[in-house]
């Protein structure tokens, strides 16, 4: 395989990883969390949420890794590191910011204290804890979809500054 083929492969892998990852975030935000909210104030719903989310969290770790590796590889191959300083490529820092946030939460904050903290909050008031998680997911989903729109449009010539 020559360099162009590696690039094309990295691009395809990037898109597949993003589809699984952000698709999962969309499912949790628009289907799972609103359904759990309707279950009333029982502690069972928190157990259910934690079980489902822990499976997704494993998937998200793999897809976040693949997205980051393929993304940085592509930037390097096309010598595009300076795109971070050009306004027309605003979607590149946005993609990287989303990736950084998820990486921080999944690999650092959650194992260190977030999981324990959420569990404590949920024992005090499960509805309040779930509402907090729900709001957080809505913001993340909005930013992620903005990054997907920006990347898909920007990579094919859309330029806000023209
Ligand atoms: C470390 C983080 C990331 C880096 C370095 C990165 C970098 C890149 C690069 C270089 C491209 C190719 C652009 C081109 O062909 O001109 C790309 C494409 C893309 N990225 Fe990312 N990305 C990252 C994270 C993300 C995230 C978190 C998302 C989604 C929320 C995302 C969504 C996309 C999409 C949808 C495309 C395909 C655009 C298209 O060809 O239509 N990326 N990314």
Image: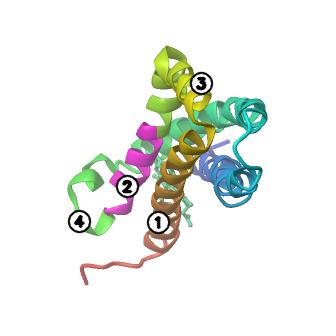
Asked if the residues shown at circle 3 and circle 1 are in contact, with their CB atoms under 8 angstroms apart, the answer is no
User: In this picture, which residue range is highlighted in magenta?
Assistant: 90-101
Crowdedness near tag 2: few (<14), some (14–19) or many (≥20) residues, C-alpha within 10 Å = some
Q: Is residue 4 above or below residue 104?
A: below
**Label whose residue precedes the other's in the sequence (2 or 1):** 2
Asked if the residues shown at circle 4 and circle 1 are in contact, with their CB atoms under 8 angstroms apart, the answer is no
Crowdedness near tag 3: few (<14), some (14–19) or many (≥20) residues, C-alpha within 10 Å = some
Asked if the residues shown at circle 2 and circle 1 are in contact, with their CB atoms under 8 angstroms apart, the answer is yes
**Residue topped by disc 4:** 87
Q: Which of pointers 4 and 2 indicates the residue nearer the eye?
A: 2
Numbered label attached to residue 119: 3
Q: Which of pointers 2 and 3 indicates the residue nearer the eye?
A: 3
**Label whose residue precedes the other's in the sequence (4 or 2):** 4
Query: What is the distance, in whole Å, between disc 4 and disc 2 at their CAs?
Result: 11 Å
Q: Secondary structure at mark 2?
A: helix
Residue 31: which quarter of the image? bottom right
Numbered label attached to residue 35: none
Q: Specify whether residue 100 is painted magenta.
A: yes
Q: Position of residue 120 (x, y in %)?
A: 55, 22
Query: What is the distance, in whole Å, between disc 2 and disc 3 at their CAs?
Result: 31 Å
Decide which of 126, 73 is in the foreground and name it.
126
Q: Which of pointers 3 and 1 indicates the residue nearer the eye?
A: 3
Query: What is the distance, in whole Å, between disc 4 and disc 1 at their CAs?
Result: 16 Å
Query: What is the distance, in whole Å, between disc 2 and disc 1 at their CAs?
Result: 8 Å
Numbered label attached to residue 94: 2
Q: Which residue occupies 29% across, 55% down? A: 83
């Amino acid at each position: 395989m020559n360099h162009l083929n590696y690039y094309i492969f990295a691009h395809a892998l990037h898109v597949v990883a993003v589809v699984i990852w952000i698709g999962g975030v969309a499912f949790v935000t628009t289907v799972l969390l609103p359904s759990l909210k309707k279950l009333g104030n029982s502690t069972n719903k928190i157990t259910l949420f934690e079980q489902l989310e822990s499976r997704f969290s494993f998937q998200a770790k793999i897809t976040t890794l693949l997205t980051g590796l393929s993304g940085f590889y592509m930037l390097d191959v096309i010598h595009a590191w300076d795109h971070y300083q050009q306004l027309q490529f605003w979607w590149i820092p946005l993609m990287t910011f989303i990736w950084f946030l998820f990486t921080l939460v999944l690999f650092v904050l959650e194992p260190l204290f977030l999981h324990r903290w959420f569990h404590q909050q949920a024992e005090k008031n499960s509805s309040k804890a779930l509402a907090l998680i729900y709001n957080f997911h809505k913001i993340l989903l909005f930013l992620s979809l903005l990054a997907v729109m920006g990347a898909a449009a920007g990579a094919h010539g859309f330029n806000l500054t023209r």
